[in-house]
Image (cartoon, rainbow, N blue to C red):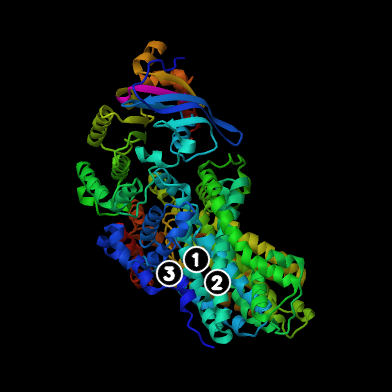
Amino acid sequence: METQTQATPQTVLTLKNLKMSFGAKEVLKGVDLEAGQGEIIGYIGPNGAGKSTTVKIMLGLIEGYSGTVEILGEDIRSAGVGYKRHIGYVPETADLYDNLTAREYLTFIGELYGMTFEDADQKAQGLIELFGLKDVYNSRMTSFSKGMRQKVLLIASILHDPEILFLDEPLSGLDANSVMIVKELLEALARAGKTIFYSSHIMDVVEKISHRIVLLDGGRIVANGTFEDLKALNHEGSLEAIFNQLTGFDTQSETADQIMQIIQGVTRDD
Amino acid sequence: MVTDPQPSAEAPESLGSPEASESYGSHSVSPDADTLPPHKRKKNFSPFSILDRFAGLFTSAGVDYPVMRRILAIKFLMDGRKAPSVAGSQSGASGKSGNQFLKSLWVYGLMGIILIPLVLMGRNFMFQISAAMGIVLFMVMTSLISDFSSVLLDLRDRSIVLTRPVEGRTLTAAKTIHVLGYLLMITGALTGPSVIAGFIRHGAGFGFLYVWMILWMDLLVIVLTAMLYLVVLRFFDGEKLRDIINYIQIALSIAMAVGYQFVGRMFQFVDLEVTFQTAWWQFLLPPVWIGAIFEVLLNGGREPVLVAMAGLAAGVPVLAVVLYARGMRTFERSLEKLEQRGSKGSAKLGLGHRLSGLVCRTHEEALFFRFALNMIKTERDFKLRVYPSLGFSLIFPFIFILNSMQGSTWAEVTAGKSYLFIYFTAMMMPTILLMMKYSSSHKGAWIYAATPVGDMAAVYRGTLKAMMLRLLVPVFLLLSAVFLVIYGTRIALDLVVAFFSTMLFLMFCFRVLSKRLPFSEPFIAGRNAESGKMFPLTFGVGALGGLHYGATLVPYGTMGLLAASLLLNFYMWGPGFRRHLASKLERVDLTRYLAESQSGKSSLEREEGHGEDFADGHKKSPLKLGRSDRLKWRG
């Protein structure tokens, strides 16, 4: 198993021996990770691997962990909430206050980040327009489709020009054109020195956009390196195949066969 | 001495004042006002001008006041738009947004009248105030738990607000003030009449102390509720907590209805000469502490026990608030648990599975029988609306038997015919049938259209049987057992007749009420279009009871009734059922019906409406109004 060797340009985030348990269940079993400026990190792993727990700890939503988390040079345990000013977050659960209008929501979030109302409003309006939602800026989001909500969430995460972005399935529900915009945007953000934590189950996208891939399984990092590194080590062609191999899952064809057997055996005979 | 109650009553009154609440409401009407920056909105947002005076207090407690204010403004803005998830789920109001909560305040105001005699009665404060405060504590606490739990337990706040640079305690403070705002309005409405009465009867000293103690009580209620949640979350998971809240809501609506039966009687028992006798357990009751502080300050009570209790009344709220401020950190953290998955559950299929083969004739009917059993087992909204009527069915027969006992001996009662009050169980039927079409997971109803369900009669009959078995049968058996003990086995035949009459009544209600697909529509708050049919249906219960009574007067009458009832049941549940349903449903395009019922329109009503007696009622129904309103809110 390879751990990261090359030095990152300017470290913005460090996890040292991060452990977390919920009751008797140990979710993180000692995670060590560094991230530098301008990196896009594909943060992947099977369900229940501890991905969102890691992100929640970094966002200060979960306490009671052991080990240290340093963000922009500060230990978040003692730093207060100020560091969150430099973080943008797209939650997987797509939580938003949808009985607000897009404008009300985005200005509210902007103000929570310490922007003025006018500043937030102006930026939000510009971004909304670029994402093609100009007409609904003043509409309540209860009527929004999944894709429209996702755009609002994305805008809310970048409105305040953060240094670090945590994106959990940020493309979910977006149409193909919007997906291209977001992919380009991520590249541009990275070029501007932002660090992006990209979490997704769609391996093709992770493979294409990530500079580095971190694979979490059972609360441990089982791989950490560029896609080429992983390929060289595992002799597999795609990230999907590497993922399967590293998470010890190689029975997909048997499982599919068994599924076929079950559905064909148990169909009602009338 | 008549004093103006304004100065100290300001806090609750002004939050509850029409202008203040107008301004919440007005946000839903004028979108421009919503989007104004907060400093421009400030001027016509009067609750905040009061709150602003306490800004220093918040800041010194480590709260980021401007941020808290911003969060609060957003919260109140959202409340103004929401369908009434906040308050009023039992208030029976329908339709409009915003002022929903204000409407429900009237109910509290009316209930507050009960407190007036308690305050006016005399100067036995230990008794009067303890009783009044007990009522206030009960009302406010149950309303907090049933209507405002969602505010305290909101998980979106965590991912939306706490992921931004906002201190946990700022969010906690915002949540607390948010809830407190509503509690103050509720207590304002509830105690308003008695506050005025108190000022007039006992003077300013009493009035101010009363208002002050009511405010203390509100704080105590929030702290106690949060602690209750904390304890529950510590030992159980979020699902359990939601269940507990659900059962508290149900208990509340039963307690309210039953309470009214006793209010009148309560005052017969009240004896002004009651002398207060201290007991250790009174130290556990906050209302008694408050009674004590009145006794000490206004009546010059000097007994050590009284002084000690008065000390508790003065000190505990302060202590509680301090503990709360500290403990809320733990509270927010334990909210994480709400997100965790529940336990694995059991793999057992349960009694319903075995029964389905027994009580259902076809495979499809048994299928929907089990489906309905499973749906109502976990559906909290359904329980909230239906279980209270189960409670009434259990309690009202006894209340009426007790009433009829006055002036007669126990022997006379047991020899009488008051067991016919078992027909109260039939009262739950209309409610059950009305609620059967709702589900919080109504979107799953596409299964009716996407699967080859051929026999709609099986769908309905299976569901109806499940409702009977799960809801009516347990209550009926329990009551029957108790009645058999009281009245003896002579009533066994009558109980059987009553059961079959109730089954018949269920069929009757089913025919009268509209036939929407089970579990296919979202719960709407407040009144239902068909609530108007409920009242006449209630008379049906009376008629059945009357018929049964008449039959007992005739030789072999009960036997005859049983035979008639069995025959009718056989027809109504059998051939008649299918015939009736066929005449109702032949024109229904299932796919279209589902598409529309999901989007809030209803075509089945129209389809059904051809030549139907109730067609007109449907068209003017408040349901329609409520729904088009909802569509409007969505923009």
Element type at mark 3: helix
Q: Chain of mark 1?
A: B
Q: Is residue B233 magenta?
A: no
Left or right: B133 as drawn, with respect to A172: right
On the image, numbered disc 3 is attached to which residue? B15
Which amino acid is tagged 3? Leu
Q: For the residues carrying marks 2 and 1, which lies nearer the camera in this image?
A: 2
Element type at mark 1: helix
The residue that appears at 42% across and 54% down in the rendered structure is B520
Q: Are marks 2 and 1 in contact (CB under 8 Å)?
A: no
Up/down of B236 relative to B581, above or below: above
Q: Is residue A210 magenta?
A: yes
Q: Are marks 3 and 2 in contact (CB under 8 Å)?
A: no
Quarter holding the N terminus of chain B is bottom right
Foreground: B76 or B296? B296
On the image, numbered disc 1 is attached to which residue? B183
* Magenta range: A209-216
Element type at mark 2: helix
Of the image marks 2 and 1, the number of the one nearer the N terminus? 1
Q: CA distance from mark 2 to mark 1?
A: 14 Å
Which amino acid is tagged 1? Leu
